[in-house]
Amino acid sequence: MNSDAKHTPKEKDSLSIVIPLYNERDSLDELHHEICHVCEKEGLLFEIIYVDDGSTDGSIDVLEQIHREDPRARVIQFRKNFGKSDAIAAGFRAATGRFIVTMDADLQDVPSEIPRLISKINEGYDLVSGWKKKRRDPLSKKVPSWFWNRAISLLTGIRIHDFNCGLKIYRREVIESVNVYGELHRYIPALAKWDGFRVGEIVVEHRSRKFGKTKYGFSRFFKGFLDLITVMFLSRYTKRPLHLFGLIGLTLTLGGFGITLYLVILRLMKVIWLSNRPLLYIGVLLLILGIQFISIGLLGEMITQSHAKHQHYSIRRTMGV
């Protein structure tokens, strides 16, 4: 990673723009010039952090040239393709600005929206997400995305329209609090909201793809569903795993106990024999599964308790500290 201390933002309202990319060689020069034009026009103190997520099309050569011409451009290159979440996390760690903007490198996100994002976050928000209300993508991509965003909003309780919009702005406190890994970048608004941060949204312009092709396929939605389960678990049960496993275990145990009690009563009354009753095996199985789930929950509680001193808190402000 290359950097220049002279151009590193240190002032109160400095801005870091994090751009994860994978095989976007053709768009990089135009994107860099657009960002610089907008930020210089607004008089912003800024840096641009490009995170090359293992590109194979020569994107790194373009980035090296951009850095030579403009030291405000900083470059991180991965050895291979690790995924967008890891690229964003690396950019967050390298960012030095008070505000951090993320955007995609394919020119579909419009740099001229940056001042509007800054204006919105200065209204008191901690994270502001873009909403591609007029999305310039094929119908095969827009329809599944619409349903997916509605499902996430319903399940998480976060009332924004476009979780996966790459154009967002964060206060530094948010990126220091939220841990991004796997494919969780699309759930950052939910993670931030559950940590007590204020999340807002504005409608942003979205352009048609000018170069290359989309990197996302149908598998993204399957992976996204699994990641949603991860987010729901982390937000609700990380500190109290017994609340989840204990509830499942108790339900199974009560079901198994009810079945076996019913069969025992019938046997005592000499109504039936138990040796030829499949229901007996189901009852015993439910009892065993229920006890196992409760045991897992208790073990989780023990692990959580032993690591309690490592828990992090999300604090908005302090007085007299």
Image: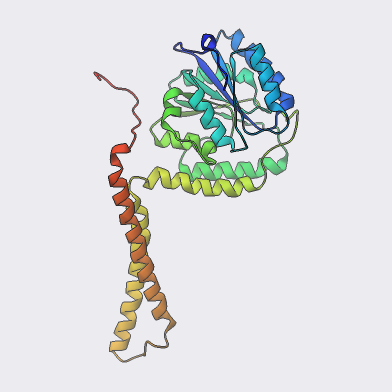
Picture quadrant where residue 204 is located: top right
Q: In which quarter of the image is residue 40?
A: top right
| Image-quadrant location for residue 246 | bottom left
Identify the residue shown where x is 36% and y is 90%: 273
In the image, taking residue 173 as reference, residue 112 lies left or right, namely right
Q: In the rendered image, which quarter contains the N terminus?
A: top right
User: As displayed, is residue 245 above or below residue 146?
Assistant: below
Residue pictured at 33% horizontal, 68% vertical: 254
For the image, the number of numbered tags is 0
Name the residue located 57 percent from the left edge and 47 percent from the top edge.
223
Residue 294 position in % (x across, y down): 33, 60
The C terminus, quarter of image: top left
Decide which of 164, 66 is in the foreground and name it.
66
Q: In this view, does 194 lie above or below 27?
A: below
**Is residue 198 at all visible to an observer of this figure?**
no
User: On screen, 102 above or below 254?
Assistant: above
Vertical comparison of 224 with 172: above or below: below
Residue 36: image location, x then y, percent: 63, 13
